[in-house]
Amino acid sequence: MSNSKKDFDFGELKAVLEDAYAIGEITRIESITCDEEELLLANDFLPKSNGSNDSVDVRTSFRIFAETGEYFLKTVSSWIDDSRLRDVETFIEWFNRRSTSPSPVLIVSKGGYNHIKKNGARYQLFSFIQQEKRYVWMKPEMTSSDCTFSGALLAKIHLSAFQFEEEVASSRSTMFQDSPALSVKSDIPFRETYESLFEHVYSRWTHKHPLLSRVRHSNRPLLARFGMAAHIVSCQNDERLLTLVHGDYHPGNILFSRTDDGHISGSVVDFDHMRWEHPFYDIAYALIMFARKPVTNSDTTDVSSFGMQRIDWSLARSFIDGYVNALRSIPSDSIKLQSFKSELVKTDANLLGWYMNLGCYLILAWAAEKVNFGSDSFSEVYLGVLEMSYHLLCDDAFHYAEKIWSASMNESPV
């Protein structure tokens, strides 16, 4: 788990940052609420002043007010080893140099490092970008225009990553080398932890959430279908396009802003999960994260009914249209980017639905782990995510993704 606020007080943090970075005197430090806390605060499940003590302790990001400006301090995920972190930071610096929109700039320390270490944890300091609204991925509140913009932004990330790959081609064999095939990364560890995680969840929470009994009885067929999805994706990837993907593309990782005339802009953050994958990995995961709606007559602003969500295929089409239209805007003389588009066009659209299956399984496993090991303050949220992902898997309508992708691609030549 990531280190949190209780690893040091703000006085110690202030001294560490002032010593490490040329940002002058720090006048104020604010810890930033996590998504789970935002969701609960909006529904009066936590005190609005400071949240519960448990929730404050799990905050891992901070807003820094200093002489030279405002900054964002991010705790690096504990599972990322130093070599992978260097790869991520290399891409962030490369991407920022070429970005045409304001993006959080990774601040280099006085010693020339992209991150600092304290109490066994690592921290990155970025310039602070003000966003108009903070979206919590667990709530189905994205608009069609938000989805269209987010799809286009993801396409730009993929195109940039594809260019980056070309520039570091000689280093590809070593960059992100701990990014194994999905069938290995997601299948074997998932099978090893799935049952033990869920057994604990069942024994502790079934009395409160009867749905868990159904999940338990579905355990074996769910695992069998997960193995099938992982196998199909792995076989496809042996022959198809692989590039660097973001790995955790959801509304909370986009800093949305709007101009006076209503134009949407934004920048992407948190590249910790970057890996070599097919672009459908990001697209499928994003469709789950961006394109959801409440089940009829259910109020998902209420945490107790939060799990009652389904895919909104109209929003999914908006997201895919945004992505595909960005591909259409590639200049004809950009041979490298045209090759990316050509390879993506040739991909079997059916693969997108399988990736959506995998995305739901991974979310299901994340929720189970969080219920088991996460803060008790957020148990209702994690159980809601578990319920939501289970219903999405049982609904099994991901074949619509193939139809929407094909329709968007065929609307006009890509």
Image: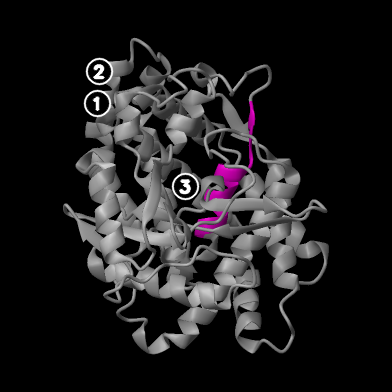
Label 2 to label 1, Cα distance in Å?
6 Å
Residue 63 location, x and y as percent? 43, 48
* Amino acid type, callout 1: Glu
Query: Between residues 64 and 361, which one lies in front from this camera angle?
Result: 64
Q: Secondary structure at mark 3?
A: helix
Q: Which quarter of the rendered picture does the C terminus lie within?
A: bottom right
Q: Residue at x 17, y 54 (%)?
A: 120
The numbered mark, 3 or 1, whose residue comes first in the sequence reads: 1
Question: In this rendering, is residue 10 above or below 320?
Answer: above
Q: Name above or below for residue 11 compared with residue 161.
A: above
Looking at the image, residue 20 sits to the left or right of residue 229; the answer is left
Q: Is residue 156 magenta?
A: no
Residue 209, given in percent of the width and then of the height, sits at 40, 15
Would residue 34 be seen by someone viewing this image from the given angle?
A: yes
Secondary structure category for the residue under label 2: helix
Residue furthest to the left in view is: 119
Tell me the residue that label 3 is attached to.
Answer: 359
Residue 167 position (above or below residue 365): below
Kindly indicate whether the residue at mark 1 contacts the one at mark 3 (C-beta within 8 angstroms).
Answer: no
The front one of 391 and 64 is 64
Measured along the vertical axis of the image, is residue 131 above or below residue 137? below
Return the residue at label 2.
203
According to the picture, the residue beneath numbered tag 1 turns out to be 199
Q: Reply yes or no: does residue 291 show up in magenta.
A: yes
Q: Residue at x 56, y 74 (%)?
A: 160
What span is in magenta?
A: 281-294
* Amino acid, disc 3: Gly
Disc 1 secondary structure class: helix
Quote the CA–CA distance across marks 3 and 1. Answer: 22 Å
The one nearer the camera, 245 or 195, is 245
